[in-house]
Amino acid sequence: MGAASRRGCRGSVAAPRPPGAVSARAAAWPLPRAMAAPPQLQALLLAINTLLRKRRYHAALAVLKGFRNGAVYGAKIRAPHALVMTFLFRSGSLREKLWAILQATYTHSRNLACFVFTYKGLCALQSRTRGKTSQAHSFLAAFIGGWLVFGDNSNINIQINMYLLSRVLFALCRLGVEKGYIPEPRWDPFPVFSAVVWGLVLWLFEYHRPTLQPSLQSSMTYLYEDSNVWQDISDFLIYNKSRPSK
């Protein structure tokens, strides 16, 4: 490639500098080697990575990573849910709403992290003391963790436990069919299941509303009661309720 081509790619050719001179760009941007981590930090990272690869510490390190994953997953799950539910149904200032979102996210993240830490720790302890693992170990560890972490009767724990309950019942029914304890249905029972669930929830909402969770009450009030009230087209199509006149 000629000099003209090099000028087209890199601009004009700079005048030669005396030996040992440093350009302004070189002074402002250190060489890649200068950007590398300090030797002390490199040694620390090497020691940590060596420790992480040791099989003898795998169980304890798995417990710590379980705590980390529980915290991250809890935040990922709760933050968008709290954001939507708070801005849809919660009243108050923007600061109060943001604080409620942060508080709910922190609680969910902390509880899930503590449960994973407890569960994996107890499983590892039972496996070490017994010399082997069994199905009872998993149930006992989760039972203790559920009692300690999710046993507090709070809104967040209620939502999590109710979420799990529906899936546990589904799984137990499938397990019963798989093991032969429940005869396999000859037709799809899901339509009957759906009809019973929706019939019961609307009956409870109409006649025994306090028995339902507050979030479910808010959702159903919006759907089935607020849709009965309007003043004009503004709160019929645009807003749920008329805005107060100033």
Image (cartoon, rainbow, N blue to C red):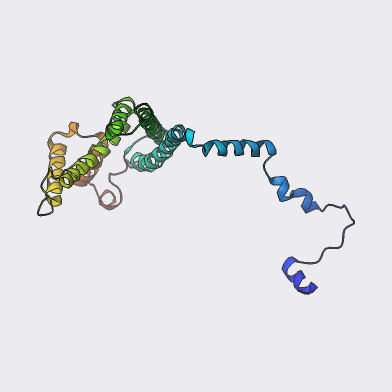
What percent of the width, then of the height, locates residue 114? 39, 30
Task: Look at the picture and state if 207 lies above or below 4.
Answer: above
Q: Quadrant of the C terminus?
A: top left
Regarding residue 229, the answer to whether it shows in the image is: no
What percent of the width, then of the height, locates residue 168? 23, 40
What percent of the width, then of the height, locates residue 200? 13, 41
Position of residue 165 in the picture relative to residue 86 (left or right):
left
Q: Residue at x 13, y 45 (%)?
A: 180
What percent of the width, then of the height, locates residue 63? 43, 33
Q: Residue at x 74, y 66 (%)?
A: 10
Q: Residue furthest right?
A: 18
Task: Look at the picture and state if 116 lies above or below 36.
Answer: above
Q: Residue furthest front?
A: 131
Position of residue 144 in the picture relative to residue 36 (left or right):
left
Position of residue 206 in the picture relative to residue 236 (left or right):
left
Q: Residue at x 22, y 40 (%)?
A: 166
Count of labels in the image? 0
Q: Quadrant of residue 134?
A: top left
Q: Quadrant of the N terminus?
A: bottom right
**Looking at this view, is 189 or 40 the one in front?**
40
Q: Quadrant of residue 5?
A: bottom right
**Looking at this view, is 223 or 52 the one in front?**
52
**Looking at this view, is 29 or 39 the one in front?**
39
Regarding residue 234, the answer to whether it shows in the image is: yes
Q: Quadrant of residue 216?
A: top left
